[in-house]
Image (cartoon, rainbow, N blue to C red):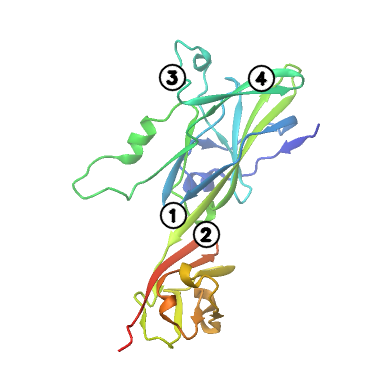
């Protein structure tokens, strides 16, 4: 048995600019959960500007839902979980869409409905042209189920671990928390410099991101499979753009090279190295 106390200090103005979820600040008393149950963690690879559609677990119509951001700001979700959702004849929630998890909580059986399709991703900038008058966001919003919500458009500050918490009261009146860790991993593809390297055998390959990356923490370079253990040096003059020097290239070095940099998000660049034929 363990306890968790949830406090809410998020500012409404900040919430509304960072996500498109229906959210409000919570002015009620702190919730002290006597028991908590973790659902299977969720990992979501995504990109800048993407919008994620997620679903909260369905427990009962009195459940309170909260979402904690990577920076620990917490907000209340306004999900419309009605009693009709538990009526098979009226509910739009069906076995094709959900799993039912049976848990023992305080010695009693509890059914928790969770979605099979854990998330969906869309981007307002994809597939649009000047002749397309479709409001993609509104169309997606209309298709949301009662326990669905959206995150986005995603920015660098949204990269990391989110926590979705659902609180409900047990038969003894104590709060029980059902929570899920949602890891949002944002990857951005960026160009390299040079963009199309072509070298003679024996020359050095100098490769880096086309521009510096803020708050860069680590860099990694991957050689073509034929030279997987290739020796390289870091370019001390271009540390903030993941610069590398690969000395004395050979025909075995020809192929796809990849640079991965980790900063506020993950940055990835791919480039094909061509080695000139010997004359």
* Residue receiving disc 4: 110
First in sequence: mark 2 or mark 4?
4
Q: Considering the image in quadrants, where does the C terminus appear?
A: bottom left
Q: In this rendered view, identify the residue nearer to me: 245 or 81.
A: 245
| Residue 34 picture location, percent across and down | 77, 29
Of all residues, the one furthest to the left in this rendering is: 131
Quadrant of the image occupied by residue 263: bottom right
First in sequence: mark 4 or mark 3?
3
First in sequence: mark 3 or mark 1?
1
Q: Is residue 116 visible?
A: yes
Q: In this rendered view, identify the residue nearer to me: 91 or 102.
A: 102
Q: Are marks 2 and 4 in contact (CB under 8 Å)?
A: no
Structural distance between the alpha carbons of marks 3 and 1: 32 Å
The mark found on residue 48 in the picture is 1
First in sequence: mark 1 or mark 4?
1
Mark 1 secondary-structure assignment: loop
**Mark 3 crowdedness (10 Å alpha carbons): few <14, some 14-19, many ≥20:** some
* Residue receiving disc 3: 92
Mark 3 secondary-structure assignment: loop
**Mark 1 crowdedness (10 Å alpha carbons): few <14, some 14-19, many ≥20:** some
Structural distance between the alpha carbons of marks 1 and 4: 38 Å
Structural distance between the alpha carbons of marks 1 and 2: 9 Å
Of all residues, the one furthest to the right in this rendering is: 1
Mark 4 secondary-structure assignment: strand
């Amino acid at each position: 048995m363990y306890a968790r106390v949830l406090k809410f200090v998020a500012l409404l103005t900040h919430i509304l600019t960072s996500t498109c979820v229906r959210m409000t600040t919570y002015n009620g008393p702190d919730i002290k959960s006597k028991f908590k149950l973790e659902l299977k963690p969720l990992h979501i690879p995504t990109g800048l500007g993407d919008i994620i559609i997620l679903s909260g677990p369905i427990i009962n119509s009195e459940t309170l839902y909260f979402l904690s951001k990577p920076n620990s700001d917490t907000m209340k979700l306004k999900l419309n979980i009605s009693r009709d959702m538990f009526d098979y004849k009226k509910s739009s929630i069906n076995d094709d869409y959900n799993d039912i998890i049976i848990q023992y909580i305080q010695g009693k059986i509890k059914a928790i409905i969770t979605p099979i399709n854990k998330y969906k991703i869309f981007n307002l900038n994809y597939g649009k042209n000047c002749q397309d008058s479709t409001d993609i966001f509104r169309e997606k919003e209309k298709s949301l189920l009662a326990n669905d919500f959206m995150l986005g458009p995603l920015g660098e500050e949204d990269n990391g671990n989110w926590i979705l918490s659902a609180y409900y009261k047990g038969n003894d009146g104590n709060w029980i928390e059902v929570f899920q860790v949602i890891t949002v991993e944002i990857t951005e593809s960026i160009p390299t410099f040079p963009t199309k390297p072509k070298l003679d055998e024996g020359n050095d390959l100098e490769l880096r991101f086309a521009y510096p990356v803020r708050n860069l923490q680590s860099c990694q370079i991957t050689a073509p499979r034929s030279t997987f253990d290739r020796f390289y040096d870091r370019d001390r003059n271009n540390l903030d753009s993941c610069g590398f020097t690969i000395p004395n290239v050979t025909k075995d070095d020809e192929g796809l090279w990849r640079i991965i940099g980790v900063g506020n998000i993950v940055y990835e660049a791919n480039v094909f190295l061509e080695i000139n034929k010997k004359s």
